[in-house]
Image (cartoon, rainbow, N blue to C red):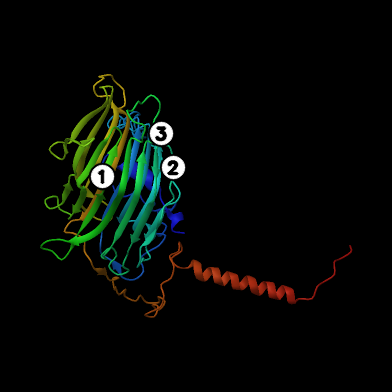
Amino acid sequence: MRRSLSVPLAGLLLALVAAPALAQPPTTPVPGPRDPNQPPASAPNGPQPLAHAVGDAGTGLSVVRLGPQGVPTNTILPGLSEQLPKQSVTEFGLGLASAQVNTEAFLSTERVVTQANPFGFAVAGRSPQSPGTLVQTAIPDNPQPTNGGLPIPETPLAKLKLLNGSVHARWDEKVGPCVSPLATAKTSLAGLEVLSALPAEVPLPVKTSLISIPDTFEASSVVKLVDLPGSKNKAVESTSTMRAVSVELAGGIKIDVATPPTLTATATGDEATSKITYTAPVLKVSQNGKDLGTLDAAHPTLDIPLLLDLVVVKLQIAGLNEKKAAFTGTGFSGFQLGATARMLDVQVLPTDKLKLPNLPTALAQISLGEQIVRAAAPQGGVICGTSQPPQTTVPQQPGAPAAPPKGAPPLAYTNAAYQSIPLFWTGTALLLAGVVIFAALPARGRSRG
């Protein structure tokens, strides 16, 4: 049941890492009545949480892009395709972890969604749903996380040795998302080889995979509520973290991860105190034991020739992109912000020196450690409390029926001011009485006239 509730995480993550969208996470739209005068489909019953919070974090261990920025992004909005970044011809993601919180979701099972996805792919920006995902949703609450191994895909683009996932979604019936932990998703793998079967047109000095990770590689996505300084309310915090030891490239290139990256979005409801915090990775690069340099925030790129100057590998880190905006919605108004980053980009045959139009940025691009975070909070922060249903007294009108006694269950909403239910049962009783009377009467012979 939990696996069947999986949404296409791979497509969501691959689409979101291109640019940090500031809209709320996609949820089931609220169905509206055909008649505008019709009452709503349902209404809350009993005390309801006052907390309003939206946040999501997505992390991918590895994303392979063939022909990056090679095809335009299609959209139904006129003139918007030219403003959006181009999509890759093909994308393939491994070890995707996503944690989403949306108190405004119409379906209760969509308020907290955590997923660990083994793989996903997209062609020209279109991605189908992939099987084998670990999922936890709330409501209801899940006291314990779900852990397990993820199916390893068979593909020439990447080879995995062992892939595990863990998901945990929580919800409190009284205070909603004001519970710890709230939303957590993790993926980890032991051993990864990327582009182990390169085309013949890509000559490499050694016959091996382009990228290999011999040690444990972990991705974590967490959404939680944190203390808001000077207030009893809370802030929404979305965090994406990576953990890796070393990365090996073709040609004897080794990259040691001295400092892993961490990306955090904290929304307080106020632009002055909401912030994006990014710890850029520090990577030490060497080739056959010779030090080539260090990749960090001050030195984000490094070009390494593998075969004369014809085959070049470009290394690039960070790529931090962030956006902030105030918003006014139907549920609450406040401030939202989001950001994306990548621990390491490896580009094969970059085309920036060719100076030719309409070319992809490279033949292939492998990204290790895709990260995205978004958070939105109401003005003044998230209130961790419970609303009480209003107690109103309606004056009794002369000749009106007596009010229902206290403690009686509320009637269901109907289109006829609560008259449909008694009319239905009255009609049903008369119909049954007619059937009994008809059956009790003696049968009469048919006339032979």
Residue where numbered disc 3 is placed: 197
Give me the C-alpha separation between circle 1 and circle 2: 32 Å
| Residue 316 in the image: above or below residue 395 | above
Per the image, label 2 sits on a secondary structure element best described as loop
Point 29% across, 20% down: residue: 357
Q: Which residue has dot 2 on it?
A: 128
Q: Indicate left or right for 337 with 217 as reference.
A: left
Between residue 264 and residue 351, name the one nearer to us: 351
Question: Quadrant of the rendered structure where residue 425 is?
Answer: bottom right
Of callouts 1 and 2, the N-terminal one: 2
Residue in the picture at 28% in, 51% down: 57
> Which is nearer the N-term, disc 3 or disc 1?
3
One can see residue 107 in this view: no
Of pointers 2 and 3, the one earlier in the residue sequence: 2
Q: Quadrant of the C terminus?
A: bottom right
User: Which residue in the protein does label 1 denote?
Assistant: 246
From the viewer's perspective, is 333 left or right of 401? left
Q: What is the three-letter code of the residue carrying label 3?
A: Ala
The answer for how far apart the CA atoms under marks 3 and 1 are is 22 Å
Splitting the image into 4 quarters, where does residue 109 fall?
A: bottom left
- Write the residue at 26% across / 45% down: 371
Tag 3, which secondary structure? loop
Amino acid found under the numbered disc labelled 1: Ser
- Crowding around mark 2 (Cα neighbors within 10 Å: few <14, some 14 to 19, many 20+) is some
